[in-house]
Amino acid sequence: STYRMMASILENRLVFVHMHTNADITPKVIENFLDNYDFDLLTDLVELLEPMYELTELLSGSKYETCSLVYPCIFNLIYSDLSEAKIKYKSGMHFRDKLVASLEVRFAHVLNNDFYKAVAFLDPRFKTFGFIRDLDFREQAIEKAKVYLAAYSYRNESVIQSILFNKADPQPCVSPELSASSTNSSSSNATSTPSNDKSNDSENNSTPTMPYKLRRRSSSYLAKISASCSN
């Protein structure tokens, strides 16, 4: 990715400096080498792209739940990590402002969707919405989450009662489109060849865990948001 390329250049900055002073390098090559301004500008860009890279890796997980992470992480990315990033040059600041405005439009369906607020509210790590610094906006977001959950509970009361009291055949409220798709999938599954029951049981009983490399990279980002909610 672009971020990894830029980060690699900064990590090997001393190598580029040594090559710049090497007498064996032709003047034409030296002329196109990165100078201090280029390295400083790369530092600004990496400062902006790094949280986006970490968040992309975190939300791309398939071995753990990510739905409750969407609203807190995207909100924190736009209004904390990017908006408060320490940028040295005006060109970097201009890029940051354009990036924030673009992300606000791109993720408007998340920021303005009460479903994602409700899912985040159900996660003990984020239920206080401490990642939102504006207290009035925080209270509004929590209230919207509660209203959404209350409305959902009312519409699906029979389903919830069936789950709580182990009643048979709960009938959830689903849209006609979802009902039709589930019917089609059921009929196709009925004609398919049955798989190995033993292997299925082992898969169902396995506990989903975050891969080590991803856990190591994203733990600090997730811990930072969780810590803001515990204060």
Image (cartoon, helix red, strand yellow):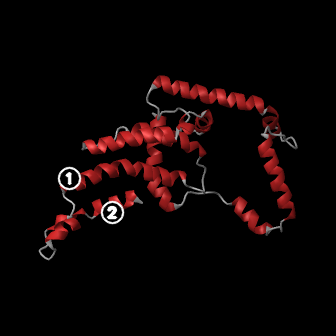
Side (left or right) of 79 relative to 173: left
Around disc 2, counting alpha carbons within 10 Å, would you say few (fewer than 14), some (14 to 19), or many (20 or more)? few
Q: Residue at the location (51% across, 33% down)? A: 129
Q: Which image quadrant for residue 133?
A: top left
* Residue type (three-letter) at the residue carrying disc 2: Ser
> Nearest the camera: 125 or 33?
33
Q: Residue at the location (44% across, 48% down)? A: 221
Image height of 190 relative to 221, above or below: below
Image quadrant holding the C terminus, namely top left
> Nearest the camera: 62 or 102?
102
Side (left or right) of 128 relative to 217: right
The answer to whether residue 15 is visible is yes
Residue 88, position as x, y percentages in the image: 24, 44
- Residue under pointer 2: 8
Image quadrant holding the N terminus, namely bottom left
Q: Which image quadrant for residue 60?
A: bottom right
Residue 61, position as x, y percentages in the image: 56, 55
Residue lying at the far left in this picture: please name it: 23
Residue 29, position as x, y percentages in the image: 19, 70
- Residue under pointer 1: 37
Q: Earlier in the sequence, mark 2 or mark 1?
A: 2
Residue lying at the far bottom in this picture: please name it: 24
Q: Tag 1's secondary structure?
A: helix
- Tell us which disc is closer to us: 2 or 1: 1
> Nearest the camera: 66 or 224?
66
Q: Which image quadrant for residue 63?
A: bottom right
